[in-house]
Amino acid sequence: MGKKSWHLDRRTFLHGAGVMSALPFLEAMGHQKNIEPPKRLCFMYFANGACVPAPKHQFSWFPNNEGSDYVNNLATKPLEKYRKDISILGGLSHPKSRELLGHMAGDTWLTAGDVRGDYNNSISIDQVAATQLGRETRYPSFSFSADGGVGYPTRSATLSFNKVGVAIPTEHRHRKIFERYFSPNTGSHENRRKSIHKGQKIVDLILESSRDLKRRLGSKDQQKIDQYLSTLDSVEKQLQKNEAWLGTPLKKVDQSHLDLEVNPKEGCVNYIRSMLDLIALGFQMDLTRVIAFQFYREDGMGVGDSYPKFGPGLDYGHHKLSHSKDYHKWAKFDNWMSQHFAYFLNEMKTKDDEFGTLLDNTQILYGSSQAHTHNARNCPLILAGGKNMGLKHGTYEKFPEKIPLSNLYLNMIQKAGVKRNRFADSTGVLKSQVFS
């Protein structure tokens, strides 16, 4: 169906006092010819590896048994209800990283670059995809992390690298992300600052505009606007709660813990969940189709080293945990991380656009660059979503080490419609049940 005179433009905004807010897809925007279902990519990284003791150990991150009858251990138990939406992959790694300690391997998780000796990193797969997929959206890609910035070589705080291998700075402050991307400011910065100080949220400011729009919409679109505003409101409420925590600086001594003063146990959980909410909302708004998020950085250098203490309630940081043989505690932390990933899968599965659920139109790779003892081999990986791109889930597959991880990345970008026959050191596409 072509565009009619009564159709809304897909880039319509709601306007308020000094702010704008983009809209989700509505029936009133029409199903235009030549509009194809979006193909999205999301990369989520956790540092320091996962617990991978002896095979079939009850605390191993990897499941017992391969194939469709795999058995989740404690580490991945929260993902049980999403078996049909995910595939667990083992054995893969980057050939140029296999002799590296895990402290350095995170720099190459999305690049397969060479950081042995001279630091020669290369373009990351998210940026390869963004070059093509970014033409369809307001922003080519988002790069987020818990620490922000780029860190430094071998202890990167970003997953994203440009075409010449230079690190792309990440954003980590929710308010800045929210204001910059979800509500681009069209008025005075000073006025907006004052409205924030008064506790006025975006929804408060655009409420009258939304009422005017709803009068022109059918009942389904009215319900969708209400749902969208409710989501926007709940996300920003949580951001307000987080801001005190986010403003607390790292300790100057070793930069390995947060000097948390206000409800620290709740703080890190809400920080992660709010970032996941923003990612899902960014996809729902079709602001971008490529997002990379680093939960925390390597070697206990950033805020994530406090997660075990204030999240699952363990007695020391994740980096120390990753060098220990206290498998039960480590599996508890892996379980806690899996809970966050399960939360994100639920968000993506329960939100939709005109082409179906966000999950079905998004390939999500969750994982790390290493297994136990910072060994940059046998990367723990979960591939989720992408059913509308032909992905078939429900199995655990273990691949021979000789197969490079870049083969998986080649599959992913090709399924997303990116025209590439090679990425980094790929030797072809990954022969996997997921892509059969």
Image (tube, helix red, strand yellow):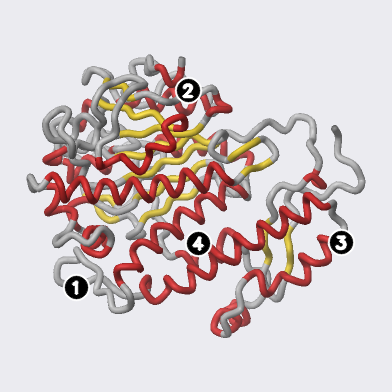
Q: Is residue 241 above or below residue 26?
A: below
Mark 1 or mark 2: name the one nearer the start of the chain. 1
Q: What is the C-alpha distance between the residues marked 1 and 4?
A: 26 Å
| Location of residue 44 by image quarter | top left
Residue identified by numbered label 2: 392
Q: Earlier in the sequence, mark 3 or mark 4?
A: 4
Q: Position of residue 142 (x, y in %)?
A: 48, 49
Crowding at mark 1 (Cα within 10 Å: few <14, some 14-19, many 20+): few
Q: Eyeballing the image, is 71 above or below 177?
A: above
Residue at the disc numbered 4: 177
Dot 3 surroundings within 10 Å: few (below 14), some, or many (20 or more)? few
In this rendering, would 297 be left or right of 364?
left
Circle 3 SS class: loop
How far apart marks 1 and 2 lie (CA) works out to 47 Å
Q: Earlier in the sequence, mark 1 or mark 4?
A: 4
Residue at figure coordinates x 35%, y 43% from the top left:
78
Q: Residue 131 in the image: x percent, y percent?
A: 52, 37
What amino acid is found at the position of numbered circle 2 in the picture? Answer: Lys
Q: CA distance from mark 2 to mark 4?
A: 33 Å
Single out the mark in the foreground, 2 or 4.
Answer: 2
Instruction: Farthest residue to the right: give it.
Output: 5
For label 2, the SS is loop
Label whose residue precedes the other's in the sequence (2 or 3):
3
- Residue that numbered label 3 is attached to: 215
Image quadrant containing the N terminus:
top right
Give the mark toward the camera: 1 or 2. 2
Residue 252: image tag: 1
> Disc 3 versus disc 4: distance between alpha carbons?
31 Å
Q: Nearer the viewer, residue 370 or 313?
A: 313
Q: Quadrant of residue 428?
A: top left
- Amino acid beneath label 1: Lys
